[in-house]
Image (spheres, rainbow, N blue to C red):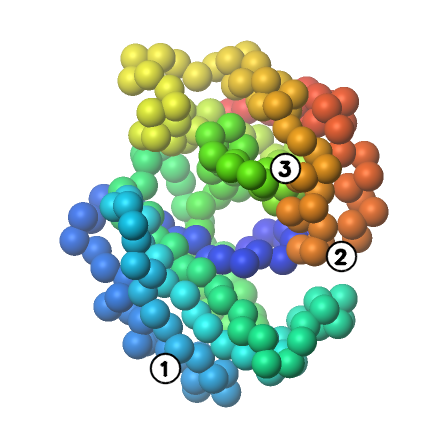
Amino acid sequence: MYGLDRFSEDLGFSLLHRDDGFSLSAYCSAVENELKSFGFSVSVETKVKKIETNIDSAFIKADTLKNLIIIDLPGYLTKKIQSGKLVKVKLEVDKDPPGGFETEAKYLFQPIPFSVNTFTLPDLFAGKMHAVLCRIWGIRVKGRDWYDLAWYAGQDIALSLNHLENRMKQTKHLNPNDRLTEHSLKRKLLQRIHQTDWNSAKKDVENLIKDPASLELWSDEFFNVICERIKVI
């Protein structure tokens, strides 16, 4: 939608208002039929969740090489693909979105002209910052989160502090009566920066971008500068 130069493995959607009765499975057959009309050989299945959350998920499965040829992805990606491998594109829908966000209509022209209602950039930045601050890493740091963070800062995009506060309160990373300020946000970010294994972060994202050499600067010092650049609204 906005020109981020990173390959993404999933498609994230959100309802505009909470709907506990929403089910993504009702849309699976429509997605499958639409993709088949463009010549894709696909199946769509609902993900069985071990823990109940506000996120509904499904997977689009398809032959990687065939679909990459059809959709004309850049050569640096197709060279890494082996015939017969499956690609899984995860679809997620937030059934209980946190408040304080705005949307705008964006227009795409491939494979046919169509419009998509999307979060504005400041609210998307807030969602990414929530991932940076609150995602549980496990054994591997999500380097893609840090790559996106650097992209937002490099584009001089302001972050919606109100939407980030709502997100953090919803996931209990911020107490209901607390206020998030620019100072407290940057303090939390600096702490997260100093906790990060940058070699692990690089490995996570290096196969998802065109120029892995751009990651050579990644360090505490580099992201400290990123932190200083961030503006909030």
**Image location (x, y in percent) of residue 112:** 51, 76
Q: Which mark is residue 33?
A: 1
1 and 3 marks in contact (CB < 8 Å): no
Q: CA distance from mark 2 to mark 3?
A: 16 Å
- Is 223 drawn above or below residue 212 in the view shown? above
Residue 98 place in picture, x, y as percent? 32, 36
Residue 229 lies in what quarter of the image?
top right
Residue lying farthest to the left in this orientation: 21
How many other residues sit within 10 Å of disc 1, few (<14), some (14-19) or many (≥20)? some
How many numbered markers are drawn? 3
Q: Residue at x 71, y 42 (%)?
A: 202
Q: Nearer the viewer, residue 138 or 216?
A: 138
Residue at 39% from the left image edge and 27% from the top image edge = 168
Q: Helix, strand, or loop for circle 3?
A: helix
For label 1, the SS is helix
Residue neighbourhood size for the residue with mark 2, other residues' Cα within 10 Å, grouped as few (<14), some (14–19), many (≥20): some
| Mark nearer the N terminus (1 vs 2) | 1
Residue pointed to by mark 2: 210
Amino acid type, mark 3: Trp
Let me know if residue 1 appears in the view: yes
Which of the two residues, 156 or 11, is positioned nearer the viewer here?
A: 11
Disc ID at residue 146: 3
